[in-house]
Image (spheres, grey):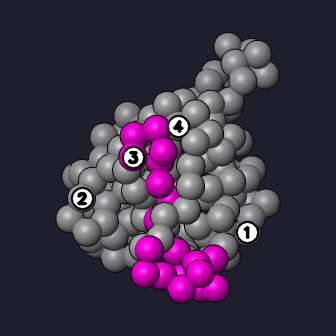
């Protein structure tokens, strides 16, 4: 199994564990054509999209075999998966109520590059964080 296929399998396995497909997430291959078309105009298909978190046409995130791409607040953010180095945090404004952060936070901060990616609040955010914290995957396990 090559690296990309192994990453895809791991992403889908974790997504299934977190029951992401019952929520505001789907496989890229299951995305309605009008949404997929919009994403294809913006994102390089070289990342080999796997999952999509959809808010609206201006707010969404795509997780691929090679990277993550997020659009929100007029900004586009990209990071390759291996560059994440397991360094992520939940981002919320200082004015946020500490008791509601877990249920209302909608951004994961990619600490290595200091950029934010959008994710639906609640369990989807924590599931994506858990998936992203796998990367980079050990090359020894991938038989590369």
Mark 3 lies on residue = 114
**Res 19 label:** 1
Instruction: Look at the picture and state if 37 lies above or below 83.
Output: below
Q: CA distance from mark 1 to mark 3?
A: 29 Å
Q: Which comes before the other along the chain, label 1 or label 3?
A: 1
Q: CA distance from mark 3 to mark 4?
A: 11 Å
Q: Which comes before the other along the chain, label 3 or label 2?
A: 2
SS class of the residue under badge 1?
A: loop
Q: Are marks 2 and 1 in contact (CB under 8 Å)?
A: no
Residue at (47, 71) in percent of width and height: 92
Mark 2 lies on residue = 75
Mark 4 lies on residue = 84
Q: Viewer-nearest of labels 2 and 1?
A: 2
Q: Are marks 1 and 4 in contact (CB under 8 Å)?
A: no
SS class of the residue under badge 2?
A: strand
Residue 36 part of the magenta segment: no
Q: CA distance from mark 2 to mark 1?
A: 28 Å
Image quadrant holding the C terminus, namely top right
Position of residue 102 measured from the top left corner of the image (x, y, whole percent): 63, 77
SS class of the residue under badge 4?
A: helix
Residue 42 visible (yes or no): yes
Residue at (62, 56) in percent of width and height: 129
Q: Which comes before the other along the chain, label 1 or label 4?
A: 1
Q: Which comes before the other along the chain, label 4 or label 2?
A: 2
Q: CA distance from mark 3 to mark 2?
A: 13 Å
Residue at (31, 60) in percent of width and height: 71
SS class of the residue under badge 3?
A: loop
Position of residue 1 measured from the top left corner of the image (x, y, whole percent): 70, 23
Which image quadrant is residue 87 in?
top right
């Amino acid at each position: 199994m090559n690296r990309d296929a192994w990453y895809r399998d791991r992403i889908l396995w974790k997504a299934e564990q977190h029951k992401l497909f019952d929520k505001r997430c789907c496989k890229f291959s299951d995305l309605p054509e009008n949404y997929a078309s919009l994403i294809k105009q913006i994102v390089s298909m070289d990342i080999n999209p796997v999952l999509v978190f959809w808010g609206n046409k201006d707010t969404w995130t795509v997780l691929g075999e090679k990277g993550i791409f997020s659009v929100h607040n007029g900004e586009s953010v990209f990071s390759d998966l291996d560059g994440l180095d397991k360094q992520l945090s939940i981002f919320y404004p200082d004015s946020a109520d500490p008791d509601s952060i877990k249920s209302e936070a909608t951004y994961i901060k990619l600490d290595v590059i200091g950029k934010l990616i959008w994710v639906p609040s609640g369990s989807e955010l924590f599931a994506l964080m858990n998936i992203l914290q796998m990367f980079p995957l050990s090359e020894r396990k991938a038989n590369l």
